[in-house]
Image (tube, rainbow, N blue to C red):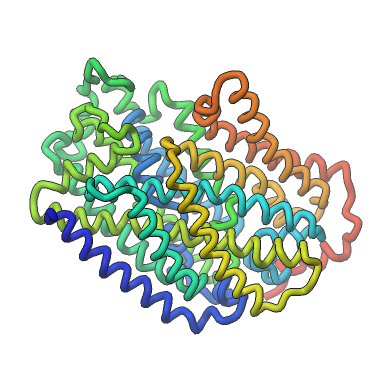
Amino acid sequence: MTNAQLYTIIALGVYAVAMALIGCISYGKSKTLDGFLIGGRNIGAWVTAFAYGTTYFSAVVFVGYAGQHGWNIGLGAVWIGIGNAVLGCLISWFLFANRTRKMTKKLEAKTMPEYFEKRYGSKGMKIFAAIIIFVFLVPYSAAVYKGLGSLFSAVFPGVETWVWMLIIACLTAVYLVAGGYVATAYTDLVQGIIMIVGVVCLIVAVLGHENVGGLSGLIENLSNFQSLPDDPNPTTGAQLTSIFGGSSFKFLCVNIMLTSFGTWGLPQMIGKFYAIKDTAAIKRGTIISTAFCLIIGCGAYLIGSTSRLILEGQLPEGGIDSVIPAVLMEVLGNDTLGIVLLAVIMILLLSASMSTLEAVVLTSASAVAVDLIPTIRKKETKPETQMLLTRILCLVFVACSFIFATQNIPIIVSLMSFSWGVVSGCFIGPYIWGLFSKKITKIGAYAGMISGLLTVGIATLVITLTSDFSAAAAKSPEMGVAAMAVSLVVVPVVSAFTKNKDTKRVDEIFACYNEE
């Protein structure tokens, strides 16, 4: 066993014990359904802000997005991190956090499907939303498993990737099932601190590498970079140092929109606004979460932009998804201090992934236990039964996503983009317009959901039939952005030609903004 492997195992063991303890301590606060799903709507600013940020960024950001875009685009990829912080975090909190908290409290809604049901008076919409969440968030979480599994395999080359994915799944299941949202929120706080420390240390390490030469050296060396003759993705120094992404400008813009605006419709992100305790906490949380996203997002893409220099233009054997693991081993795997830091970075990426997994799992399990099953049975289910069922389904969902992740699906980014685009494309229009306008109708909301789903579905089918699935996967970011745009436009347009049958109920709902 190498020193890197030994230190990583020790760090992993300490981390696992800490997460399990938080889960056990949080058990007492998750004995009610309200406490299990949204922490009793009493979560503070720091905890909520870190929960939002850590759910936003997983190992996929580092291994998939930062590795691929940093390698192909260069320094311009940092704009994705800036866009995530400003559009995906700052604007989202500023526009939606307080309205979401007040309206979901008024509606007594604990999940996204429940919000749709009570806002639009439609059980069918609740069922439809629950199905979308459960079906399409499986590949989302599977992408997280694969990203982290490939990274641990780089440190432990003799251990199969699925073994690490199984360890991650078991650890996530233990503290999530025990403590529910409270456990995930407080573990996110710990994980967020680890992520910040790890990213700062990693930035210092990669910029200090002899092939990089600091920030000024990075720019100079990238401008002089020349691709190897056998490089499958050749590029130029001008491309890698272009402030706006050079020839990849359009691609860059699409990915900024997908990964930034996408958070506006993702239930695992919006759910954080349900739980925050008051307006004052929201104001503080807005600043904290934005700062967190700037550090993690920009840091990840800056690290990715150094990859061609550190690896001397040689794409690793595992392809684009192995770029960041190879960078870590090159930068940190040669001395004792570097190996200790490598162990910290591994826990950083484990933290990033587990925080995302727990949010996705809790969202999906509650969609079935709280929204889907009671509605289909047409019988009132006791809260205790719903909570037990939610805990069981958390385990089922972890198992399903693990099995899905073990299948041979090589492109992590495309896998994630499909599910991100579909889920956000379905929900973004009905969710946002439902917060701001009394004129939005049930038919308009339905139209927004269906049009978002069909935009991705039809485009994928057409491209697959005319070319192949890999071509459709390559276009998944464009499909996701198009789905979100279509949903946002269709909802108010269709609502303009239809009527609300229960205006009194809608007026009572919107009275929540005048309360407190």
Classify the position of the C terminus by image quarter: bottom right
Q: Percent x, y for residue 455?
A: 67, 34
x 56%, y 19%: residue:
467
The relative height of residue 229 versus residue 268 in the rendered view (above or below) is: above
| Residue 181 coordinates in the image, percent (x, y) | 51, 70
- Identity of the residue drawn at 30% across and 48% down: 160
In the rendered structure, the answer to whether residue 216 lies left or right of residue 55 reads left
> Left or right: where does residue 273 sit relative to residue 155?
right
Where residue 208 sits, quadrant-wise, is top left
Residue found 55% across the figure and 44% down from its top = 420
Q: Is residue 99 visible?
A: no
Q: Is residue 330 above or below residue 175?
A: above
Using the image, determine if residue 329 lies above or below residue 389: above
Q: Please determine whether, in this image, residue 169 is positioned above or below residue 91.
A: below
Where is the N terminus found, in terms of image quarters?
bottom left
Q: Position of residue 324 (x, y in %)?
A: 28, 41
Q: Quadrant of residue 514?
A: bottom right
Residue drawn where x is 81% and y is 58% of the image = 122
Residue 71 visible: yes
**Residue situated in front as seen by the camera: 301 or 397:** 397
Is 289 left or right of 394, judged from the image as shown? left
Is 170 or 47 nearer to us in this picture?
A: 170
The location of residue 28, given as percent across then percent down, is 50, 84
Q: Nearer the viewer, residue 467 or 121?
A: 467
